[in-house]
Image (spheres, rainbow, N blue to C red):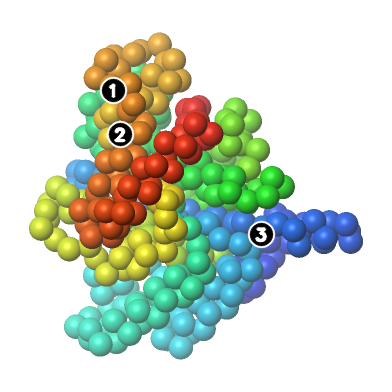
Amino acid sequence: MQLPLKSGAVRRLALAIHPAKSKRKLLYMASVLNLTSYMDETGHPDDPNLEYVGMAGFVAPFGAWEVFESAWEDLMRNAGLSEPFHMKDFAHSVGQFKPWKGKEEIRRAFFGRAMNLIVETRATPIGAIVSLSGFRSLTESQRSSYLSPYYIGFQNVTRGAAIEAMFEEHEEKVAMVYAYQSEYGTNNGGRAEQLWHAIRKHTDFGSRMGSYASATPAELSPLQAADIFAYELSHEFESRVKRTNADVRWGLRQIFGMYRIPSPQIRLLDRKELLRTIKESHFPDQTGVAELDDNQEQSAHESMMKWFLERGQFTAEQFSDFMEATAAILGHTNDRPI
């Protein structure tokens, strides 16, 4: 469903997806975190200028999002901004940010405060980036099975959000909110919503998926935070191709700092990872799966951690700790495709 929410939207959303109808229910709510995730997509697979698309966002307890919403609205109002924050507009000083063009002191002060509010939620960042060249290298039937790179990112951030609840009490579930996207059917029983329900029904982590909702960034301000992460993450991966010597952008460094070792949840879905999903789903067209190593999943995790290390985000000791934990975690959270 798409939620028509305005001021105080996070609280009303929480009451809808974490209902408290009795004293007993209230006691139950006190024992869990009421985790809620907010996810936004980045890029479009038809854009000829892009190599990567994906989806990203955050998972945090309801209480953290309620505090964030109030502070975020204050920030927007005090900055004289009447429209929802869009990172693309801010980065290029267009739209409501046009008067700030060239005024770097104002821009830095505003963005610094915005990032501080995100960091203060102590949320867990979740991200999935899909290689378009990897996707296009698959056979036609394999590509058709995925439908679109959008749904690949959708499935992976959904899994990542659900896994966050696995580290909490067994009653904990994650209420999941996705940025409204009519093209991919995020509301009114569309394809994305149908996919979400299929994931919940057919995966081992589905028991940690609480409820589904779709909204716009104007309706739910945490989606504006997700927009920042999605934008920054896609630009980091595009730099691999176009600006190989570029430093990690300041905003993304702040988000990376939110990760709690040993569980950074950014996934790169390149050709081999896409083929691994095809292999494990027993899809009839197994073209290319012979390229895979026996330990492809662990290799993919290790590759991502090496990327973090090379980009100066983790130390060698943290890398070692992560790999040790990954070997244990992979035995308990199987990644079974839909």
User: Do residues under tags 2 and 1 come within 8 Å of each other at their CB atoms?
Assistant: yes
Q: Residue at x 31, y 63 (%)?
A: 252
C-alpha separation, residue under disc 3 versus residue under disc 2: 33 Å
Sequence order check, earlier mark of 3 and 2: 3
Q: Amino acid at mark 2?
A: Ser
| Residue 151 in which image quadrant | top left
Read off the residue under disc 3: 33
x%, y% of residue 167?
Answer: 58, 49
Q: CA distance from mark 2 to mark 1?
A: 8 Å
- Which residue is label 2 attached to? 299
What residue does disc 1 label?
293
Query: Nearest the camera: 57 or 327?
Result: 327
Quarter holding residue 193: top right
Pick the residue in front: 43 or 279: 279
Residue 174 in percent (x, y) is at 62, 50
| Residue 74 placement, left or right of 28 | left
Give the answer, above or below, for where 138 lies relative to 120. above
Few, some or many C-alpha atoms within 10 Å of disc 2 (few <14, some 14-19, many ≥20)?
Answer: some
Image point (53%, 80%), residue name = 71
Q: For residue 314, which quarter of the picture?
A: bottom left
Which callout, 2 or 1, points at the residue further toward the start of the chain? 1
**Disc number lying in front (3 or 2):** 2
Q: Is residue 293 left or right of residue 66?
A: left
